[in-house]
Image (cartoon, coloured by chain):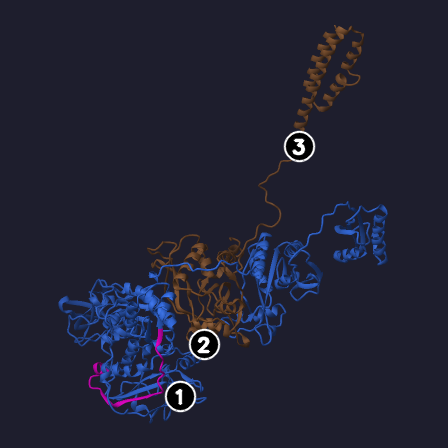
Amino acid sequence: MKFSYNWISELVDGLDVAAADLSNLITLKTAESEGVEKYGAALASVVAARVESAEPIEGSKNVKAAIDAGRLGKKTVVCGAPNCRAGIVTAYVPVGVTLGDGREIRKAVIAGVESEGMLASGAELGLNRDGAGILELQISAGELLGVAVDHIIEIDNKSLTHRPDLWGHHGMAREVSAILRKPLRDPVDLSILPEGAGAIPVSIENFELCPRYSALVIENVTVQPSPLWLQYRLEAIGLNPINNVVDVTNWIMAEIAQPMHAFDADKLHGSIRVRSAVAGEKMGALNGETYELTPSNLVIADDSGAIALAGVIGGAASAISDGTKRIILESANFHAGSVRKTSSSLKLRTDASMRFEKSQDPANTVRGLARAIELLRIVSPGVRVVHGIADVAGPVRQTDPIRLPIGWLNRKLGKELPIIEVRRILEALQFGVGQGSEDVLSITVPTWRATKDISLREDLVEEVGRMIGYSSITPTSPLLPAAVPPTNEERQYLQGLRTLVAAQGFHEVYNYSFLSEETVQHFGFDPELHVKVLNPIATDQGLMRTSLVPGIWKNLVDNSRFSDEFRLFEVGREVHKRSGDLPLEVNHICAAVYFKEPGAQGLFELKRLGECIVPGLELRPAPALLYEHPTRTAEAVYRGEVVGRLFEFHPSMVKGRGSVLDLNIDALMRLCPTETCYTSIRRFPTSAFDLSVIVPERALVGDIQRRLKEFGSETLQTIEYVRQYSGAPLAEGTKSVSYRLTVGAADRTLSSEELGEARTRVIDGMRELGFDLRV
Amino acid sequence: MLEDDLSQLHAMALARIETAADPEALEAVRVEVLGRKGTLAQISKEMAKLSPEEKATIGKCLNAAKQALEGALEAKKTRFESEALARKLDSEWIDLTLPAPGPRPGSLHPLTKIQHEIEEVFTSMGFTVLGGPEVESEYNNFDALNIPPDHPARDMQDTFWLEGGHLLRTHTSPVQVRGMRKLGPPLRMIAPGRVFRNEEVDASHEHTFYQLEGMMVDREVSVANLIYFMKTLLSAVFKREVTVRLRPGYFPFVEPGFELDIQCLICGGPGCPVCKQSGWVELLPCGLVHPNVLRLGGIDPEEWNGFAFGLGMTRLVMMRYAIDDIRLLQSGDLRFISQF
């Protein structure tokens, strides 16, 4: 929302703080200012000039105008405007002036003629948006335009979300008056409202959706452009000047935050009714669009149908036109949620809807009408008010005063404030302040703050706090008992895990939680098993990931363009559908190694990484998934439970060798023993013997080892893989795998008989199973 | 006469020890002179023929010669050994500027680093670290934080909606609700995590970013306490004294609500491009917990109150490491990520 410094200064008597300082004060005490910009800087040097003659220039569309610029003298100016003709008074920009768009006016030769300055349009001067021709003024040559240089303070709309009153200059002026302790002027004079019954019947279907609807009929209206000062003010705060009637409604909206609408009274049929739209009802709006409505949309209707979308936009059929003579002014109040719903479902945010969404004050409607009468009399002399105002309102919500104990307030702030200071601040913000008891104030909230903003004593802490300035509060340490906070084991585990994996040479990446349907299908996942995003920004963000693998895969592919060998990992969450409840989020770690050259090093690095993460992790061959290498895939098993996978990507997925270890962290945390117990150190010597097993080429070393273990008695301490060998003299398709077995006992040295027995047991057992042994 | 022989022998043997070229030559000298059948042994045999007086004199000389030669031999032997060791060690020369085998060191993501750091600071001040789901209910993300349906504040946070009526949390604040229910009063908690906003991505906007929620609930918590805590914590995070200021900010789950600015760490106040010439950098929203939020968290606002804040970790990381494009953080690009 843009605020005109000049406008505020008209409402705050004796405003003596420069715009930049005011902007800063507003930031500290009221709402966030995004900055100050000087507006209409050129206007101070622009004067009215009479065009004495305008001669065509041969070979140019421009004319050579001789002008009389009063005290600036007579000048020759080249002008390209179609309306530049002898006799008009227009705006003359002298040489040396810089326009709002940064253009500096210099003496120049245009089409062979020396031009001393420029004749300007309203758009060029920032007065309005009319750039079709130069201004035609009703003042004398040499006079200033009667509009002053302004400063525009832009306030962040988000910081005004809770303040319906700050959507108008009067509301901001109230803040400024409280901050600077200067008197506030009310632009509205309610005493000029006419007496008597309204000229048009109004009815409201549902007072909750429309708490109040006030309307006034005015006749003998002349629709014409607004005076320059009015156009300039609207233009300066970003509102488009249209005609005097529409401009007056916009002025009032910008002044007292009451959105208004003007209908052409002669285009209305019968009475006004505020009702819910009928399903399928259509309305052509002022913006040229036609909207199909549902009963959730509130409309203003006459006997023929909808004539406006309540609080959002007017209808085209009843719009003000040049020929309009009689108007109906609507100044109403609508339910914030209803306006917001309509505005967001139709994707139509207007200056009006933005204000109504903030819960405007129903007391404000008649103030808008009073102000309109006053302004219309200025911009369209001769207007006549027809009868009184139509004013229909639901029951007014009465709220009890808020009890504000000063001791409580001071404890909340952490500062001792005298009651008189609290009283002064709240009165400056126009709260009703009564004395409840000696140290309790009884606060009545003004109507413009009562709609949603303030209802609790906590809300008043903010009012007082911001006005005294938070910088006046001394930071104080709270008195707290010393206590060890409960630990979060998941956090600790994740922290340790990340540190460990990084120390093994892996770089941590963060990937998005989204996947595209295309990727999901590429990996052979079922899109139906993924949680869908209903309003994704782009189609590649339509599904929530059920695996970290696709993200890691993209990292591999992307980085393989720059690097021949790398390692990376991500710790993140999978999201799995769960009926009824929130989806299941599972922590995973996904680590990957890339080698451009062939080999299995990556897989074994990852296997080692897995063993570092969980000592005792085993791998078991598993059928490959669509994207996995068919003979380089295994399940990771811990304590009998599958906790992840180790695989190499299928060569169609990655150029080079990309290997991945994907582990379910939640499962690991659940399975990991919390405490380990010490076993005493062996005191008696052990003995070792080697043996080799001849097996088919693809027999698993891990399986053979498991067999060996089965045949070892309780004296078997360890089995250590030594090497494997294939080739002569072994038969084709076989290999020899060697192990070293260690035997011993905790309480004695084994006898040679016992040793032999242990050895024979293993060998015989294996032979019985059909294994060929070399011992 | 024998005495002369002895001294001659002694001198000759010493010279031979001295000139022995290798341990073998040295051994030959030892055998020849000091061996069982060596020249000294022969002399000692011949001594039997001498008178006791002569025996005593020669014996003395003989022992002295033996000791001297043994000493010389030992010294020479030690020299050979140490020379051999030196040669061996020299042959074991290694270039330690060669790269070590195995992978180069890895790295933690800058967000992980900052998160660990901040968690340390907070836990040292008695805060519990909590987690919460990234997919949240509408109730926890909005309603329980005093943002009812159709509240315009919902527009402040463009939301990703999911099927089943769920959403991606737009802030870490839902963990306030979970924390209050889990811990009960008094409590001190933080909750770092990933949050989502439905926004177009560019150099300074992301749809996925990281926040750290903080909350403290106790009997007496004031604005003065909040300022103290924030100042202390931020000084620890930035590892230097920071100046903070509060100004009004609107967040429905706090009342009063603040925007907390820190005095620009680059220029220290006079104004620079980083702080847009204002001298202040907006860092985090905070406030006293709204009584409705306490109530919805199962805590009686008449007895307890507290403060809450939300720290933008992504922003902090970008400030700390002078990262000028937010998209790099989730690019997975090793050229970026391996720098940390």
Q: Colour of chain B?
A: brown
Mark 2, secondary structure of its residue: loop
Magenta region? A376-403
> Label 2 lies in what chain?
B
Residue bearing mark 2:
B148
Q: Is residue A93 left or right of residue A582?
A: left
Q: Residues within 10 Å of mark 3 (few under 14, many from 20)?
A: few
In which image quadrant can residue A208 be found?
Answer: bottom left
Q: Colour of chain A?
A: blue
Residue A219 vertical placement versus B278 (above, below): below
Of B36 and A303, nearer the camera is B36
Residue type, numbered disc 3: Lys
Q: Say if the magenta span includes residue A383.
A: yes
Question: Do pointers 2 and 3 mark residues of a single chain?
Answer: yes
Residue bearing mark 1:
A206
Residue A477 vertical placement versus B1 (above, below): below
Q: Is residue A272 left or right of residue A192?
A: right
Between circles 3 and 1, the one closer to the viewer is 1
- Where is residue B179? Give x, y as percent: 51, 67
> Label 3 lies in what chain?
B
> Label 1 lies in what chain?
A
Residue A366 vertical placement versus A414 (above, below): below
Mark 1, secondary structure of its residue: loop
Of A401 and A523, nearer the camera is A401
- Where is residue B166? Give x, y as percent: 53, 74
Tell me, for residue B135, which label it has, or none.
Answer: none
Q: Is residue A87 left or right of residue A243?
A: left
Of A356 and B184, nearer the camera is B184
Give the CA separation, mark 2 to mark 3.
83 Å
Q: Is residue A330 visible?
A: yes
Residue bearing mark 3:
B88
